[in-house]
């Protein structure tokens, strides 16, 4: 609701706006090339657009299919990004990763294709649960994937 969004930090408002209002409108295949840095805490900031991250995320049919970005390799900035990140993909500080940056990890980047989301789109499935490749790992309705009971829907 509007009240919930207005009560969020500016970065969290960006997350909500992008995920709820913008991403669903990206129907035709499209590469998103810049996103607010708050949305992609591991990505390097754009030199041309300060405050935005260098990304190359493939969106199709209103869903992110393949997120990709140039990785941030400044350890001090990375630590700050871990501390300030928002959204459902929030990660804990990875001290080993930050230490690798401090000792000189070279610039890197990559893209991860979401095969399950692609299969969902190609089959017209209503839920990602319908196309998960390992059905015994699917949590039952209402259970979290991590720590779910040993029983599963088959």
Image (cartoon, grey):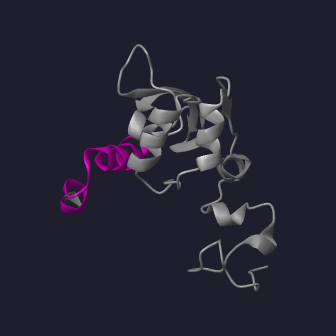
Q: Which residues are magenta?
A: 3-24
Q: Total label count?
A: 0
Please tell me which residue is depicted at 48% across the width and 39% down the height of the picture.
Answer: 40
Residue 86 in picture, x, y percent from top left: 40, 51
Instruction: Determine the residue positioned at 55% across, 36% down.
Output: 59
Picture quadrant of residue 139: bottom right
Location of the N terminus (image quadrant): bottom left
Q: Main secondary structure of the magenta part?
A: helix
Relative vertical location of residue 43 with respect to residue 124 in this rendering, above or below: above
- Is 132 rendered above or below residue 110? below
Q: Quadrant of residue 77?
A: top left
Is 6 inside the magenta-drawn segment?
A: yes
Residue 66 in view, yes or no: no
Q: Where residue 121 appears, x then y in whole percent?
A: 65, 48
Q: Left or right: where does residue 121 sit relative to residue 151? A: left
User: In the image, residue 128 lies at what x, y percent?
Assistant: 64, 60
């Amino acid at each position: 609701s509007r009240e919930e969004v207005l009560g969020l930090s500016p970065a969290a408002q960006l997350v909500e706006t992008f995920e709820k209002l913008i991403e669903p409108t990206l129907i035709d295949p499209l590469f998103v090339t810049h996103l607010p840095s708050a949305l992609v805490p591991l990505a390097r900031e754009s030199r041309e657009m300060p405050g935005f991250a260098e990304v190359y995320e493939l969106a199709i049919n209103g869903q992110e299919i393949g997120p990709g970005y140039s990785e941030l390799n400044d350890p001090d900035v990375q630590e700050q990004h871990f501390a300030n990140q928002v959204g459902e993909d929030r990660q804990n500080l990875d001290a080993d990763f930050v230490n690798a940056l401090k000792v000189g990890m070279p610039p890197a980047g990559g893209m991860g294709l979401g095969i399950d989301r692609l299969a969902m789109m190609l089959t017209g499935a209503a839920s990602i649960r319908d196309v998960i490749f390992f059905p015994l790992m699917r949590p039952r309705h209402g259970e979290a994937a991590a720590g779910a009971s040993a029983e599963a829907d088959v």
